Image (spheres, rainbow, N blue to C red):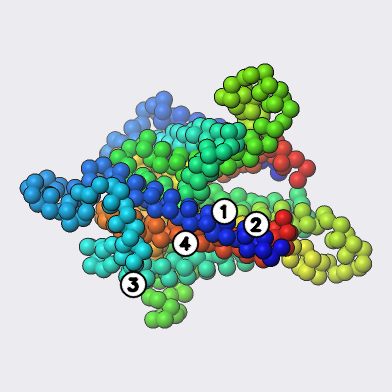
């Protein structure tokens, strides 16, 4: 189910991008923070597509804004992890020696924590805003990028064209970024797609636990937390944000699987 | 070869020790990075009312007037002697709290892994028995949903729907250990382990599928089939037995997910486990509690990884030979 899976993933993500785009562009004219006491807990209707919550806020506007926030935080987290992790992996694999030893040690230390626990502890000690939450999630995924780049770099540094570049007197950093890096981009792209789905899940879990970006910023995780007690009288407050998170992660997972089957040489012939 | 085995094991052990040292440094630094300091964090707005001499006395009491290196080594020295700190809100030492919370999480972890294996291996084998068929698609879809549903969403939905429609909410009553009330304890563990087990079943389905397909393409399988062996016997005795190596590794790797997921699931189902202990520490700003508990969890994780590695070497002679 490789190519169709990737295609399905892209379709889901595009549909969600439209939903998030509505809040970012403020097309609907709905304010995710505007409270309206008389219209509390209204079921879905043409006026309120996903109903309203306990403060009379439009659930669709909140889901849409929460989705945009979640995507922003996850993308920043994975960008941080990918940049720091790839540079460290390149350095460790290419220069070897004590640099490799130090980076390898740091990677092992970060791997010794259960991922969600590390993000939780980091987010709780940092001054809390959306950016620090993104960094806390990003730090957790740095070691994964170090590991996936270091291995291929170790073998690439012994390949003819890299040796040739070295013999022309090219600087180490020049070789790393001009010759080694382009050969590992497909691995990094696959890892970015797979990590994004974990980042979305982690961000949602943190905000569910009350350790995400602080209120009143709408977040899918905290919406589900608030909906716990309302679910019997207003099930849409739980199922609307819930369905959107699941779709988002399914889309990213399908995209990641599709990309891996297409780009990752290790998967060739396995299916 | 035996000597080589012992040698590589020693190296692995030393590596784990070095990692643990790094973990302790990271945990120490992390909790010193709290905005303000532990006294203001712990007391909140009341901290502003402290006179300079009161503050100095508190700093001396907590030892945070000492240089960082002295603080680190005195903390490490305390840990070595079993002094993990004291939780002022619970009126108990962190060691006592952990002694009662760790078994809860361990029980949850074991139940979740058993459920995940019971679901994951059959579904993975089913998928591999006819690749790209309807049953393959079905079990791969189960795995995709398992990977994509956040544990907190599944837990909240199960809890609210079952409690509301069937009145089934054993977790609403106080937690009972297995020795106090076995039946209530098992009921309380049922939903949390289902939630965590479903999350771990997903990667197990995928690993089983890949491993079974991989092994089924080997020559020895074709030979066995040519000799007229029954399909069932071939699947279980020849293929599954060999596929157990990657499945065992994958199961060991899921322990990290389990410990992280435990924080969420224990909180939702009010289970007094170690994950909830961390969360309470964070919410009540009891940093000594957080510091020691996080360290204990990392220690448990490193030990499990070491054991997985060991089991892997025992069940797969090829790893030993390499």
Answer whether labels 4 and 2 touch (C-beta < 8 Å).
no
**Chain of residue at mark 3:** B
First along the sequence among labels 4 and 2: 2
Residue B62: percent from left, percent from top: 21, 55
Q: Which mark is on residue B116?
A: none
First along the sequence among labels 2 and 1: 1
Choose mark 4 or mark 1, whichever is in front. Answer: 4
Q: Is residue B288 left or right of residue B237?
A: left
What is the crowding at mark 4: few (fewer than 14 residues within 10 Å), some, or many (at least 20)? some
Quadrant assignment for the N terminus of chain A: top right
Residue A229 visible in rendering: no
Q: Secondary structure at mark 4?
A: helix
Q: Secondary structure at mark 3?
A: loop
First along the sequence among labels 4 and 3: 3
Answer whether labels 2 and 3 touch (C-beta < 8 Å).
no
Residue drawn where x is 41% and y is 28% of the image: A24
Pick the front one: B11 or B141: B11
First along the sequence among labels 4 and 1: 1
The answer to whether marks 2 and 1 sit on the same chain is yes
Choose mark 4 or mark 3, whichever is in front. Answer: 4
Q: Badge 3 is on which residue? A: B174
Residue A28: percent from left, percent from top: 40, 29
Residue drawn where x is 70% and y is 58% of the image: B319
Quadrant assignment for the C terminus of chain A: top right
Pick the front one: B296 or A220: B296
Compared with residue A88, is residue B280 higher up or lower down, i.e. above or below?
Answer: below
Compared with residue B266, is residue A223 higher up or lower down, i.e. above or below?
Answer: above
Residue B65 visible in rendering: yes
Q: Badge 1 is on which residue? A: B146
Q: Secondary structure at mark 1?
A: helix
Residue B3: percent from left, percent from top: 67, 63
């Amino acid at each position: 189910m490789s190519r169709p899976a990737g295609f399905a993933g892209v379709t889901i993500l595009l549909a969600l991008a439209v939903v998030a785009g509505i809040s970012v562009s403020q097309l609907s004219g709905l304010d995710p923070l505007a409270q309206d006491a008389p219209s509390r807990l209204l079921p879905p209707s043409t006026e309120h597509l996903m109903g309203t919550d306990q403060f009379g806020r439009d659930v669709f506007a909140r889901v849409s804004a929460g989705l945009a926030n979640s995507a922003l935080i996850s993308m920043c987290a994975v960008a941080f992890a990918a940049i720091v992790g790839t540079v460290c992996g390149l350095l460790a694999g290419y220069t070897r020696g004590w640099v490799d030893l130090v980076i390898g040690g740091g990677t092992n230390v970060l791997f010794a924590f259960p991922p969600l626990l590390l993000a939780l502890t980091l987010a709780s000690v940092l001054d809390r805003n959306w950016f620090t939450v993104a960094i806390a999630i990003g730090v957790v995924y740095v070691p994964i990028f170090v590991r996936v780049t270091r291995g291929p770099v170790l073998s690439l540094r012994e390949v003819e064209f890299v040796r040739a570049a070295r013999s022309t007197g090219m600087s180490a950093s020049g070789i790393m970024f001009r010759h080694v890096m382009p050969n590992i981009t497909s691995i990094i792209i696959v890892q970015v797609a797979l990590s994004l789905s974990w980042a979305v899940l982690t961000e949602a879990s943190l905000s569910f636990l009350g350790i995400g970006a602080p209120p009143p910023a709408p977040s899918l995780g905290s919406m589900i937390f608030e909906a716990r007690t309302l679910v019997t009288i207003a099930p849409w407050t739980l199922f609307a944000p819930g369905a959107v998170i699941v779709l988002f992660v399914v889309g990213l997972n399908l995209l990641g699987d599709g990309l891996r089957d297409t780009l990752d040489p290790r998967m060739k012939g396995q299916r | 070869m035996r000597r080589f085995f012992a040698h590589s094991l020693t190296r692995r052990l030393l590596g784990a020790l070095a990692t643990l040292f790094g973990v302790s440094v990271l945990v120490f630094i992390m909790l010193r990075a709290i905005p303000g300091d532990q006294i203001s964090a712990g007391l909140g707005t009341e901290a502003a009312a402290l006179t300079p001499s009161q503050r100095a006395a508190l700093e001396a009491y907590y030892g945070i007037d000492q240089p960082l290196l002295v603080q680190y080594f005195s903390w490490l020295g305390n840990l070595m002697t079993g002094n993990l700190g004291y939780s002022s809100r619970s009126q108990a030492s962190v060691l006592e709290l952990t002694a009662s919370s760790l078994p809860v999480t361990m029980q949850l972890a074991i139940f979740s892994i058993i459920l995940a294996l019971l679901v994951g291996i059959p579904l993975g084998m089913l998928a591999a028995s006819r690749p790209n068929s309807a049953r393959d698609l079905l079990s791969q879809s189960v795995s995709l949903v398992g990977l994509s549903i956040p544990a907190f969403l599944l837990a909240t939905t199960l809890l609210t729907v079952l409690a509301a429609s069937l009145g089934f909410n054993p977790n609403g009553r106080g937690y009972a250990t297995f020795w106090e009330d076995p039946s209530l304890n098992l009921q309380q563990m049922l939903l949390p382990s289902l939630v965590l087990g479903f999350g771990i079943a997903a990667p197990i389905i995928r690993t089983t599928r890949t491993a079974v397909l991989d092994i089924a393409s080997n020559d020895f399988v074709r030979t066995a089939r040519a000799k007229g062996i029954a399909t069932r016997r071939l699947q279980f005795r020849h293929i599954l037995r060999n596929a157990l190596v990657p499945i065992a590794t994958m199961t060991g790797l899921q322990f990290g997910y389990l410990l992280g997921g435990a924080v969420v699931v224990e909180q939702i189902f009010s289970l007094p486990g170690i994950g909830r202990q961390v969360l309470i520490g964070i919410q009540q700003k009891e940093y000594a509690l957080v510091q020691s508990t996080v360290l204990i969890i990392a220690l448990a994780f490193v030990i499990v990884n070491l054991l997985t590695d060991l089991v892997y070497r025992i069940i797969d002679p090829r790893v030993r030979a390499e």
